[in-house]
Amino acid sequence: MAKVLNSCDTDFADLARDRETMMAPPRRRALPPRLFLPTLALAAGLALPPLLGSPPAVAATPGVHAEEIVRFPSLDADLTSGAPTALTGRFLRPKAAGPYPTVVLLHGCSGLYAKTGRVASRHIDWALTLREQGYAVLMVDSFGPRGVAEVCTVKDRPVRASEERKRDAWAALAYLRARSDVDSERIALMGWSQGAGTVLAAYGPGGQGNGFRAAIAFYPGCRTPLSDADWQPEGPLLMLLGGKDEWTPAERCLELASREPVKERTEVVVYPDAHHGFDSPHAPLRKRRNLATAPAGEATVGTDESARKDAIERVSAFLAERLRG
C-alpha cells in the first residue's frame, strides 16, 4: 500500500519559468541527414552523499503546479528476504484535469539528486518539459532509500538495473495504476544510462513490464538484453544514443535493434557527434574518470545542443503517438 503523509505546499511556477532552478529534496522532519535501417534512424548532429534516510512522503494541496513526495514499496521482497524497500518518488501533475497519461522517469548511476542535494538538472528539465505537454511525471529514487549515493564508480553494484531497479519500475507502475488521477492504460517508462538499462530490463519478457504502453531509453549499455536471445520489448521502444559515447557505446544497441523481432518494435536514433549525457541542459563537455563500466574507465560527457533539441522533439512525438493516439 502506498503511503502519503504530512501535507505541504510545493509551487513549481518558478521552476517552469527558470529551468536553472532545481528541486531540493524535502527535509526530514524532527527532503541533418538520416539513415534508416528497418526502424533504425540515424539523426544528424551528431552524488548526492549517502542519504541519512528516505524523505517522508508528503502530498501537496491541490493546485496546477502541485508536487507530491510519495512513498511506495518496491517489489524486491524476493531479493531482500524480508520487507520490500520503501521507495520514494516525486510526482508532478500537469495543469489539465486528470486522469493523466503518465511517464515514469528512472535516473542514471549518479542517482536522482546532484551533489548539491537538488534534483539533477536533466531530470527536472525533462520532468517540466513533459508536464508542460500534459503528462504527469513520477521520478523514482532507487538509491536514497537503500543508502546508496551512486554506482558509477562501483563494479559490483549494490543496486542493479536487472534486479532491484526493474522491480522498482514495476512497483512504480503498480503505484500509479492505483491512483485515481492517473490513466492506468497510458503509462510510459523512460530512463537514462543505468536507468535506461533498467527500462530494457523492466520492459522485457517474463516480467510485469507489459503494463507500460511505451518505453524510452537514453544511451543504455544493452549488454544484458543482447546476451539473451529471447529478449524483446513488450511494446514500442525508442532508444536514443550518442555516436561518440565512450561509456555506453552505441554498437551493442544497434546490434540488439537489428534482431528479430526486436526491430519490429524498436526505433533507434544515433547522434553521430554526441557523447554520453547529450540531452543534459547546459552541461559543458568534460571527462569523467574511474567509471566502473566504461570500456576505458573514463568517458566524455556533456550536452550536444542539436542532439538534445532533436531528442526532445522525437520523445514528444513518440509519446504523443503512444499515449495520446
Image (tube, rainbow, N blue to C red):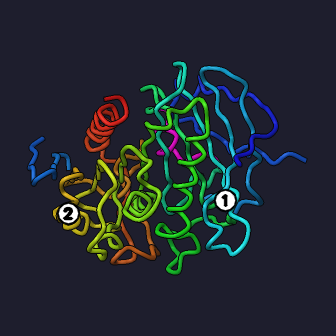
* Residue 282 is at least partly visible in this image: no
Q: Would you place residue 298 above or below residue 233 in this image?
A: below
Residue tagged by mark 1?
144
To which quarter of the image does residue 142 belong?
bottom right
What is the count of numbered marks?
2
Mark 2: which amino acid?
A: Leu
Q: Nearer the viewer, residue 75 or 319?
A: 75
Mark 1: which amino acid?
A: Gly
- Tell me, yes or no, whether the highlighted magenta stretch contains residue 125: yes
SS at badge 1 = helix
Measured as percent of width and height from the top left, residue 172 is found at: 56, 49
* Residue 49 is at least partly visible in this image: yes
Tell me the magenta residue range.
118-128
- Quick check: 42 left or right of 287? left
Q: Which residue is rendered at x = 60% and y = 24% of the image?
A: 65
Instruction: Check residue 199 in the rendering and tell me which mark sits there, or answer none.
Output: none
- Quick check: 23 left or right of 221? right
Crowd band around label 2 with a 10 angstrom C-alpha radius: few (<14), some (14–19), many (20+): many
Q: Which residue is rendered at x = 68% and y = 41% of the image?
A: 69
- Quick check: 10 left or right of 172? right
To which quarter of the image does residue 309 belong?
top left
- Tell me, yes or no, whether the highlighted magenta stretch contains residue 174: no
| Quadrant of the rendering where the C terminus is positioned | top left
SS at badge 2 = helix
Residue tagged by mark 2?
254
Could you tell me what secondary structure mostly forms the magenta stretch?
helix
Measured as percent of width and height from the top left, residue 190 is found at: 42, 48
> Which one is earlier in the sequence, the residue at label 1 or at label 2?
1
Q: Which residue is rendered at x = 33% and y = 72% of the image?
A: 223
Q: Disc 1 versus disc 2: distance between alpha carbons?
A: 33 Å
